[in-house]
Amino acid sequence: MEFFDYYEKLFGERWPALLESLKGESSFETLHFEQSLEPYYLDRASVFAAKVLGAEPGMDVLDMCAAPGGKSLIIASMLQGEGSLQCNDRSPERRVRLEHVLENSLPKKWRENIKITGYDGVKFGLHKKESFDRILLDAPCSSDRHVLNSPAHLEVWSAKRIKRLAVEQGSLLASAIDALRPGGIVVYGTCALSPLENDGVVSRILKKRPEAHAVEISDIPQGADRTEFGVHVLPDRTQGSGPIYCAKIQKKL
Ligand SMILES: C[S@@+](CC[C@H](N)C(=O)[O-])C[C@H]1O[C@@H](n2cnc3c(N)ncnc32)[C@H](O)[C@@H]1O
């Protein structure tokens, strides 16, 4: 099958162990901010990626592709109600879930500075130029772990789709950089295995946006791999967490 051949070629000797780990249990962190609230279970690598953003109280933050909201919970907990958090997602159905997650898992005092919107992320660069201190771009991606565990998705998987997604991801990343204030930071992330959706996108867009550059991420999870521009957390070496890729990109002052 195309999916297996594609990734076997990419990961070589590492593939059998990686494949087994992708079929196995994920490793979750429980986000439970108050006894009366609903706990939320988030993959440990996703918690790491959201923290890389380094959001601080008082900052204006955009979560460009936010639904269902796991990483928004982490950002809101970093802002502690001070500054602003715009949780955006283009999908109406997924925004309903996002609203539910924020309402039921965040303390009221951390919710007051949050607004939910439904714009196409590629519009921010034009309509919200230089407006945010931090942007999380958790991009739509090939979601390989999900695909692997869903026969219907596996059936329609294609290498062409990866290329199509990489184009979309690039447009979103360029828009995010344009929407950043000078000195601001974008964290670009995916849950994809292929470098085409990860370093490949970052490399292409940094060439088009010379005002931005990748900065090294400190304190990475044990077992995670450093790549040319970011960090790839893969479940075979991190006790089940991931896949998550993230790169930290800063706009010059
Ligand atoms: C990987 S998921 C985000 C997961 C989320 N960050 C979390 O931690 O729960 C990607 C999201 O991007 C949204 N999306 C896809 N294309 C978009 C676009 N052009 N603009 C805004 N959102 C988009 C999808 O609806 C989907 O909810």
Image (tube, rainbow, N blue to C red):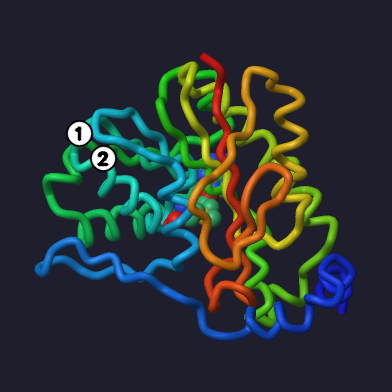
Q: What label does residue 79 carry, if any?
A: 2
- Coordinates of residue 25 in the picture (x, y in percent): 52, 84
User: Circle 1 sits in a helix, a strand or a loop, which is it?
Assistant: loop
Q: Which residue is mark 1?
A: 82
Q: Is residue 56 visible?
A: yes
Residue kind at label 1, given as amino acid type = Glu
Q: Is residue 93 visible?
A: no
User: Residue placed at 49% from the left, 31% from the top?
Assistant: 185
User: Residue placed at 66% from the left, 73% from the top?
Assistant: 147
Task: Determine whether 228 is above or below 13 in the image.
Answer: above
Q: Quadrant of residue 5?
A: bottom right
- Coordinates of residue 15 in the picture (x, y in percent): 79, 77
Residue kind at label 2, given as amino acid type = Leu
- Give the quarter of the figure containing the N terminus: bottom right
Direction from residue 245 to residue 57 in the image, left or right:
left
Nearer to us in this view, 93 or 77: 77
Q: What label does residue 14 carry, if any?
A: none
Direction from residue 30 to residue 159 in the image, left or right:
right
Name the residue furthest top.
253
